[in-house]
Image (cartoon, coloured by chain):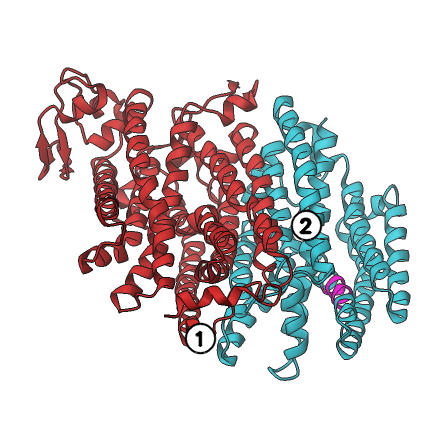
Chain colours: A red, B cyan
Amino acid sequence: MTLTSLWPALAAGGPAQLLPARQQMALTLGFHIILVPFGVAFTFLMLLANYRGIRHRDGDAMLLAERWSMVAAVLFAVGAVSGTVLSFELGLLWPRLMGRFGAAYGIPFAVEGIFFFLEAIFVAIYIYGWRRLRPWPHFWTGVPVPLAGVGGTLSVVAANGWMNLPGGFSLVNGQVADVRPLAVFFNRAFWYESIHMLLAAYIVAGFMIAGVYAAGMLKGRRDRYHRVGFLIPFVVAALVMPAQIFVGDVMAREVFHKEPAKFAAIEALPTTGDHVPETLGGILTSNGQVRYGLRLPSGASLLAGFSPSTRIRGLDAIPAEVRPRPELVSAVHLSFDVMVGSAFLLLGLALWFALVWWRRRDLPRSRWFFRCAAVSGLLAVVALETGWVVTEVGRQPWTVVGLLLTRDAVTTSGNIWLFFAGTMVLYAAIGVATVLVLRLLRRRWRAVGLAEAQVPYGPEQPEQPAAREVGSR
Amino acid sequence: MTNFIAVVLFAGVVLYAVFGGADFGAGFWDLTAGGAEPGRHPRELIDHSLGPVWEANHVWLIYCLVILWTAFPGAFAAIMTTLYVPLGLAALGIVLRGSGFAFRKVVVRTAEQRVAGAAFAASSVITPFFFGTVAGGIASGRVPAEGGGDPLRSWLNPTSALGGALAVVVCAYLAAVFLTGDAHARGAGGLEAWFRRRALLAAGAAGALALGGIAILDSDAHRLFERLLGPALPLVIVSALSGGAALVLLRRAAPRLTRVLAVIAVATVVAGWGVAQYPYLLGTHLRIGQAAAPTPTLVALTVVFGAAVALVIPSLALLYVLQQRGQLESTS
């Protein structure tokens, strides 16, 4: 996630803190965003398994729900604290963003606070409620968690959308005045950005979890427990995938209309014109030429306006002093291509599954399907990260488009390199520890085996273990 | 309107000090509980008591941050560009603490538990210390309104030292009182006595620090000193009285009442700081009214606050009630 490290030229013209501050933000946001889908969407999958477990007396699903809640507990804790760091960084790294625009930009975060509260409260009740709460009440204590996840995602992304298309206030002598809170929250980038991220959370969580069980099935663990563990997350992610492609397509056109500079970077388009080809891959060189790319004639014009004669504004339409450097344009362009490419690969995997299921009502038999499924979660994370590179790097050199340059938003105090170094060490340790702890859980559960595993709500429902036999055959 | 939002903000500070503080304090006792064998039972109780609630309690910090930067953006930027050293360290401490706690619950080998536990416990002491120094820097007027104040002397000064030390001790006191009650509820007599002794110790230390603090504030933050003994005096007296009463009751084992008294003791002393500082947000150079965001922003925050009261308070109550009734237990 330290993509910006490849382009030290970024710091040109800004204070010494600019480069490390951007690195730090990229690292911590890139780290945190991987955990977000687990609070927002994984908890939904967990409740699906729990529902199935109670409703259909499915012991496998019940056991999965309980184990998933333990995984969610670890990831939610790391997500909560790494999210807190981002709040601090808004002030520590970007004080002139907050100082000048906090009165408007802060509002969506205040709304998010409520959802974070609800999420933290009910996630705890749910995770710690397995032993003593009765099955249905326990299930219902979990329901607010994914709902709060939706609200939280919409709120935080509302703030991000506001940076791309600021609105809902006026500037009087450089001061924020005449704030219209609803217009701040429901800014012109709000709907497409927030829904895109929400769906992304479900895709990442779904494919990640499905991938774990796909890997298990490749190693020969093809029992019902693994089937259910694979099917619930995979089906959810596969259902969301086409919707995401549709939303992404609509969104690209919205960006074309509303954020022309970002669109020019996405398309790596040096000069304004019509019949613009869609360039796949390639980089923008310093003399303004696109090299190594594969060009589809009039592709970009067709996608943006349904007609080859659609005129697309190029980088030359951006005033030279705020025109993004070619290296940044290449980063945005390639990230976009990687994101879209990954999304179509995932869609292909979903269609593969759908076709086989439609014809045979069963999982594909091919080992290649499970190999692909095993890495689908990583591919989804790649799409998530590159998507954030597109929106964040694609906004440069602005922090608040048209109003605040990143080099003017950054702090001018302190040695951010030290802070960055400390953060890197800490995050590396925590990243490694998180993986180790999750592997430890897996090893422990595997050692317990399915036959001896204690099904949740066991003591209260003596008939439950009967369902267990299905899983242990 | 601006005063109302300032109260809403400060209420968050008080609630974070009380609930977040009790969780930090538990880390203090975790750190000082000794080796793996003698410390096993106290640590088990700490795990059991903190597990379900620490994340919810932690959100009060986020609440304070979002209200501060939305309602008083300039002051937020000023604090952040001055006190960035302790705040940056506190942010990293929070990460270490939360992850360490979550990991310790999962790992089983003593060596691994020790590493995760040490991370949790040490950062539970360091983090409130840094927050205390931040409070001291703000209270003693060392944050200029335009920001960029002295990066070292703003938090390496007598009032900050007092704030940091007091924060650690007060957190430890709260935690010991809470955990005495939890041990009582579980019928663990030995453990109850173990934490009761520590509550008394921490209370003594807090009292001594508070007395010594009078001299420090008199010389280092004179306005704060005068106002604490002026308009804020009733709060200071209530704090001292309920703190003392809690100690007496602690011996008689009346956990619920003791807890309420300990909470009052801490809440009133933090509120006393707020009253003493009024009507200034920073030192004596930035008034609350001058620092406030435009009115529509404050109205929006009031609406959000109303929604929070309607949604969050009952949910928190549910969480605490379920926990107190022993309905929340770790599955592992």
Tags 1 and 2 touching, CB below 8 Å: no
Residue A440, percent from left and from top:
42, 71
Residue A103 vertical placement versus B260 (above, below):
above
Residue A448's label in the rendered image is: 1
Residue A135's label in the rendered image is: none
Q: Main secondary structure of the magenta part?
A: helix
| Magenta-colored stretch includes residue A81 | no
Please provide the residue range marked out in magenta: B172-179
In this rendering, position of residue B184 left or right of residue A434: right
Near-viewer residue (A58 or A396): A58
- Dot 1 falls on which chain? A
Quarter location, residue A300: top left
Task: Identify the residue shown where x is 40% and y is 52%.
Answer: A31
> Is residue A424 among what the camera can see?
yes
- The residue tagged with tag 1: helix, strand or loop? helix
Residue B237, percent from left and from top:
90, 52
- Dot 2 falls on which chain? B
Residue B68, percent from left and from top:
62, 38
